[in-house]
Amino acid sequence: MKEIRSLTLLLVLSVCGLVAGETKPSESPYAEIVKNITGAKRPEKKAVSVTAFGAKGDGTSDCKPAFDKAMRKAKKQGGMHLRVPRGTYYIKGPIHLESNVWLELEEGSVLKFSPDPNHYPTVNTSWEGTFVMNHSPFIRGYEVENVTISGKGLIDGNAMTTFSTWRAKQEDDKQLSRQMNHRHTPVSERVFGKGHYLRPQLVQFYNCRGITIEGVSITNSPFWCIHLLRSDNIICRSLKYNAKLVNNDGIDPESSSNILIEDIDFDNGDDNVAIKSGRDDDGRQDGKASENIIIRKCRFKGLHGVVIGSEMSGGVRNVWVDSCTASGYCKRGIYIKTNPDRGGEIRNINVTNTRFEDVEDLYLATSQYAGEGKDSQHFTVIEGLKVDGLSCRKAKRGGLILDGTEAEPIRNAEFRNVTIEETPIGISFNRTEGVVLQDCNIGGRVESVPTMAK
């Protein structure tokens, strides 16, 4: 009887695989999305060195007044091409960017930020999906457009001695921020900053349009490295990370749309790319999804390759991970996570032609992240997960894992051309509907003519 049930399952999966046709990036909305992502329009202005505003690249002089002066002039004249020549520019506080600014970091240049929290004033921002007043991100664009950060220089958060130690101290503030979220406390009253321990991001664009971040290297971030919050039309290209402090996510699009992330060398102390859209009540009330996001030709290294959630209450739609590779160990390759506190939806998530090496789980989608939300009823809809070309050498815990809820099973997941050379558990699908497998080889491949009975 067991053999009959197994045969029936194989036939059903084969038929499903034949009925549903493959979807390649060129035949899907992928190409149209890429076409519409233009990033920043660079100002047609003669480049001006930051040294003309008094900055000194000696590693000790405070260059914040020079950057502030440059930004005031940029605002007055409608933009600026600001060049940072070779040298180390020590900056005691944040750089607040203006519209139509091109900040070019020449090879050998370093923006080295002060690690003193007192140098970062309180601004409206977000922390792990909750809107708060907190320390300013080190480089911040707020309600600006057409901003470029480019070049072969280095952005050094220099956060080792202060901010990176705060995780052990943040729990009370983290829980307070979540309580304020659930109680609908006005954001103006959610004041953290001095005397609190919620770490700021290194680079943040909030309510912005037309952004390009290209070529630069990033290290020693106080928290997430690049945070794209409620912003649109963004290109992140050819960045290089050596960011291994606590929670140094590489790129976090949050409630943002039309984003191209390509040709990036990740090496992070947390997720490489983590797509979010707000936590719980804040995310559901804001209702702004992250959507139309292309991640292609990247090289992953760090905790997880691509993550969706767990703060995704505003929804995540139309994501492609295409032609990426990984080096070294990633705990999880593709990780989709939510729980009944979140609500929202996760739809149309695509992975094509992507390979990892050693992982704990190759592909994991769970609606029960961290065991939270057991008394809540905000179940997330997860639907339209498509894989065509995903592989790894070894998955130490499991290969393909889907774990929905009874109220909202994970629906319509398609796995084609998946290869896992070694794993103890190839497939674990629980509380799912409409799963398709086609041309999958998990734990090895059998192609030889079967032996005959003697």
Image: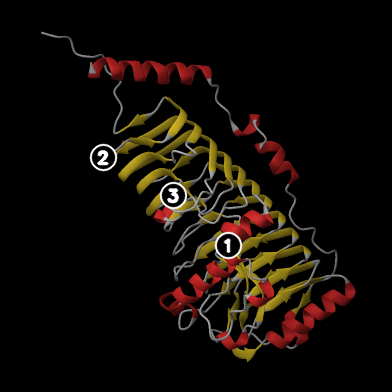
The image position of residue 310, as x and y in percent, is 50, 54
At label 1, the amino acid type is: Gly
Residue that appears at 69% across and 43% down: 34
* Residue 207 sits above or below residue 306 on the image: below
The image position of residue 36, as x and y in percent, is 75, 44
Viewer-proximal residue among 36 and 111: 36
Q: Nearer the viewer, mark 2 or mark 3?
A: 2
Q: Is residue 190 left or right of residue 197?
A: right
The label number, if any, that marks residue 326 in the structure image: 3
Mark 3: few/some/many CA within 10 Å (<14, 14-19, 20+) = many
Of pointers 2 and 3, the one earlier in the residue sequence: 3
Viewer-proximal residue among 297 and 71: 71
* Rendering quarter of residue 33: top right
Q: Nearer the viewer, mark 1 or mark 2?
A: 1
Residue that appears at 41% across and 33% down: 418
At label 2, the amino acid type is: Pro
Question: Would you say residue 60 is visible in this rendering?
Answer: yes
Of pointers 3 and 1, the one earlier in the residue sequence: 1
Of pointers 1 and 2, the one earlier in the residue sequence: 1
* Secondary structure of the residue carrying numbered label 1: loop
* Residue 155 sits above or below residue 24 on the image: below
Q: Is residue 215 left or right of residue 388?
A: right
* Residue 82 sits above or below residue 314 on the image: below
* Secondary structure of the residue carrying numbered label 2: loop
Q: Which residue is mark 2?
A: 424
The label number, if any, that marks residue 147 in the structure image: none
